[in-house]
Amino acid sequence: MGEVQETKTMTLAESVVKLLAEDELTVTTAESCTGGLVAARLVDVPGVSEVFKQGFITYSNKAKRKILNVKKETLKTLGAVSEKTAKEMAKGAILASGADAAIATTGIAGPDGGTEEKPVGLVYIAVSVRGQMYVEEHHFEGDRAAVRESTVEAALALLKKGLEETGEE
């Protein structure tokens, strides 16, 4: 009986993998505050190997620069937790992997590290699909685990939106 319910309700990750497969697209991840959780959620889906080739965990600014080509000036003037950094992470992940789509996450999961300008829970998510960029700013509530989990859900939802919108053209 439990198996029937599972097939009726498709998870967000399953629907994203299905859309990617239907459009014959590949995806990569560039994660900071989520530390690989987005990639892990995708990898939980059977058949994901057709669409997911690799992910990048670039927690430090040095890794963001070296692996994803995030500009030093962006990090210096705007910081790692900014819309521009998220965009550059997504672009860099596509260039580094050759994927058709990318999810990038950068934020302050807490419990420390927040400031008045950039409080704990501030997260930027950038998704690039077929050259189209989507960016969202979020202010999540809760502890470190809750902020990271909320970020994963929002990132997958944004990728789904991007896939649906670019697939309509």
Image (spheres, grey):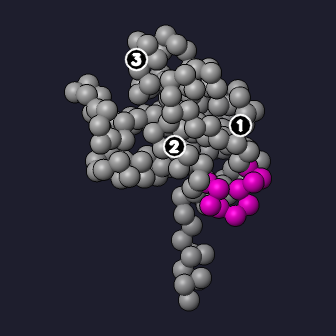
Residue 110: x and y in percent read 32, 41
**Region rendered in magenta:** 42-51
Residue bearing the label numbered 2: 35
Pick whichever of labels 1 and 2 is earlier in the sequence: 2
Residue 3 within the segment the image draws in magenta: no
Is residue 138 in view? Answer: no
Labelled disc at residue 78: 3
Q: Check disc 2 and give the amino acid type.
A: Gly
Q: Nearer the viewer, mark 1 or mark 3?
A: 3
Q: Residue, x 35% and y 48% (percent of image)?
A: 144
Kind of residue at disc 1: Asp
Taking depth in this image into account, of 146 and 110 the one nearest to the observer is 110
Foreground tag (3 vs 2): 2
Please, what is the three-letter code of the amino acid marked with disc 3?
A: Leu
Q: Which mark is residue 100?
A: 1
Residue displayed at 73% across by 61% down: 47
Magenta residue check for 43: yes
